[in-house]
Structures are given as structure tokens and as C-alpha cells.
């Protein structure tokens, strides 16, 4: 499984990354977590607002910090 966290490094983007790490640890899964801060790369992925979370190529969340419960439902 691959999770991409898109954002320039703002407070909300860091919060999204931390919540994803917590959810992955809680689920006990082995997941590759990538941080993408290049706006051109984000646009290629279909992300125009940050923070954004992409799980296995599917955009799951854009423009807000997802809850741990939401993330767990995406990776279960």
C-alpha cells in the first residue's frame, strides 16, 4: 500500500501527515508513506488544494485534515 500526502509543509499538511502515521501504526500495516510538496506533481495527481491524501492512486481527501477514523476506513 502506498499513501501520498500532498502539501507544501504548512501546519495542516504536517497535521495530516502525523494523523496518517498514527492511523497506519494503529492498524499495524506496512505502508509506504510519501510526502509530495511539488505543486506540478500535485497537479498531475489531480490535487489542487492541500492538504491532500492519496491512497493507492485514489484521492481520498483534499483541502482538509482527515480524521484518524477516516484514514483507518481507507486502509482497512
Image: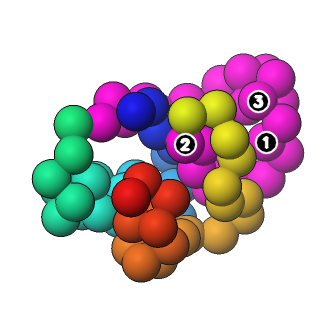
- Which residue does the numbered mark 2 point to in the structure image? 55
Left or right? Give the position of 23 relative to 3.
left
Q: Are marks 3 and 1 in contact (CB under 8 Å)?
A: yes
Any part of residue 52 in sight: yes
Q: Quadrant of residue 36?
A: top right
Nearest to the eye among marks 2 and 1: give it: 2
Q: Quadrant of residue 76?
A: bottom left
> Residue 44 magenta-drawn?
yes
Left or right? Give the position of 59 relative to 15.
right
- Give the CA distance from mark 2 to mark 1: 13 Å
Q: Quadrant of the N terminus?
A: top left
Residue 16 at x, y percent in the picture = 46, 61
- Which residue does the numbered mark 3 point to in the structure image? 45
Q: How many marks?
A: 3
Residue 66 at x, y percent in the picture = 53, 70
Label 1 crowding class (10 Å Cα cut-off): few <14, some 14-19, many 20+? many
Q: Quadrant of residue 8?
A: top right
Q: Which residues are magenta?
A: 31-55
- Which residue does the numbered mark 1 point to in the structure image? 47
Q: Are marks 2 and 1 in contact (CB under 8 Å)?
A: no
Residue 41 at x, y percent in the picture = 72, 21
> Residue 63 magenta-drawn?
no
Q: Secondary structure at mark 3?
A: loop
Residue 69, compared with residue 18, is above or below; it is: below
Left or right? Give the position of 52 relative to 16.
right
Amino acid at each position: 500500500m502506498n499513501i501520498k500526502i500532498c502539501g507544501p509543509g504548512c501546519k495542516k499538511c504536517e497535521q495530516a501527515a502525523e494523523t496518517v502515521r498514527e492511523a497506519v501504526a494503529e492498524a499495524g500495516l506496512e505502508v509506504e508513506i510519501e510526502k509530495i510538496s511539488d505543486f506540478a506533481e500535485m497537479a498531475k495527481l489531480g490535487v489542487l488544494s492541500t492538504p491532500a491524501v492519496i491512497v493507492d492512486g485514489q484521492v481520498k481527501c483534499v483541502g482538509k485534515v482527515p480524521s484518524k477514523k477516516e484514514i483507518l476506513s481507507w486502509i482497512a
